[in-house]
Image (cartoon, rainbow, N blue to C red):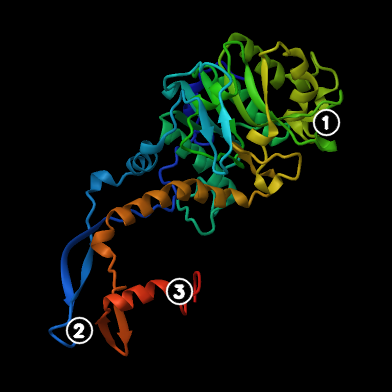
Amino acid sequence: MGDYSYHALANMGPQGRWRRPLLIAIPIVLLFLLFSSSVSYTPSSGSEPQIEFPTAQNASIPEEDTSMSTIIKALYGPILHPIDAANFTDEDGDVYRLHGKPKFTQKLGKKVLILDIDSRPLTGKGQLMNKELKWKGMRPLSAGMLSHYMFASIHGYDYKFIRAPDYADRWGTWVKVPMMKEALKTHDYIVFMDSDVMFHYPHLPLEWLLNYWNMTDDTLAMMSIDPNEPQNYDSRGNRYLNTGFVIARQSKRTQEMYKAWAECPSETKYKGCARWKQDWVHEQAAFGNYLRYDYDRPDDIRVLPCVEANGAPEAANRGGCKGVFVRHFWVDKNLVAKNLADSVMQYFLPRLHQLYMSTASEHIVDAKGFKLEGAELIELTEEEKEAKKKDGKKNQKDEGF
């Protein structure tokens, strides 16, 4: 690679420029209800009690409060998980506990880079770099990269999309290796994700995961192990580490490792590595067959459990790889967009419900103290109310019609 700084990637001409996404396709609807007046419904007899029906009006939202960054902070900010919390409980009620005193107790902020790397234009319909991107028709991998951008925005990390140059003789995924190497020149930690990889809990900080997975001052990188299947074994009988999700720490030794990795197919050091220029699984096989055995100090490469950092629930029958914290949708890339929606709605819905219930007195009309006779509402007697309690579900289904 040329002798240029990482930030200079933005100045390599139109084809080398990364473009920060300006719009995020997130299905968030902000509902602000002001109940400022009411009208009354009066039964036919003036002596009968009245039921109040409030009138809802849409409130205008000041323009300065409608930026996506403001919306994201408003949605996730109040519920961010503490960085140094002793445990985390997932959506299934399973508790994950730290194994010791947390190393990271303060936000890392811009020391962390969330990184997307691709050499393709991605300008087609439904793709990320198209000027118009709609939820309907969005390509799955656009959803993945937008989730990476959103995760960085939630926690205040840096984010970059690098449109990488291609190798003339290698499969496209090889470009991630030198680009990660360059990124580590300007950030303490990088998190690279393939576009079909997502953090399942956007409110869970990376710092907590670094504590949980025991990132040390000697760790070079963290990667998840692949499922226990025949195609996922290297030449020495060990399972591959999946390079679709990598957390790497800046250090001289990390730079040396990435240099050796990128140069592996030259066979200057690793005989036989040239086959992985094109053979499946490309740069992952090169790392699995060679690099992992040269960088094998106890803390060099932290191997993450497949159940926590690989796969998805739909792939749980493949070695239990259900992606508790990080999901990799190699099982079905069409699930990426659905999970982007889930990563928003699992937080938005409780907040919407909380708003609904907190203002219940303004919009819930309780007419259960009445009975219907034809078109008339007639107030129940005390005896009728007691009888109603015993037979309240008559002619009703649990839900639906």
Q: Which mark is residue 43?
A: 2
Q: Earlier in the sequence, mark 2 or mark 1?
A: 2
Task: Kindly identify the amino acid type of the residue bearing the numbered disc 1.
Answer: Tyr
- From the viewer's perspective, is the residue at label 3 or at label 1 nearer? 3
| Position of 25 relative to 264 (above/below) | below
Examine the image and state in which quarter residue 166 appears. Answer: top right
Q: Position of residue 330 (x, y in %)?
A: 69, 44
Answer left or right for 308 relative to 185: right
Q: Quadrant of the N terminus?
A: top right
Query: Which element carries disc 2, helix, strand or loop?
Result: loop
Instruction: Name the foreground residue: 190 vs 80.
Output: 80
Q: Looking at the picture, how far across and down is residue 98, in whole percent?
A: 56, 23
For the residues carrying marks 3 and 2, which lies nearer the camera in this image?
3
What type is the residue that disc 3 sits on? Answer: Lys
- Nearer the observer, 379 or 320: 379
Residue at the spot of label 3: 393
Q: Is residue 19 visible?
A: no
Mark 2 Cα shell of 10 Å, populated few (<14), some (14-19), many (≥20): some
Q: For mark 1, what is the residue?
A: 233
Question: How far apart are the alpha carbons under marks 2 and 1?
Answer: 77 Å
Within-10-Å neighbours for mark 1: few <14, some 14–19, many 20+? some
Instruction: Indicate whether 66 appears above or below 169.
Output: below
Q: Secondary structure at mark 3?
A: loop
Name the front one of labels 2 and 1.
2
Identify the residue at image location x=44%, y=21%.
108
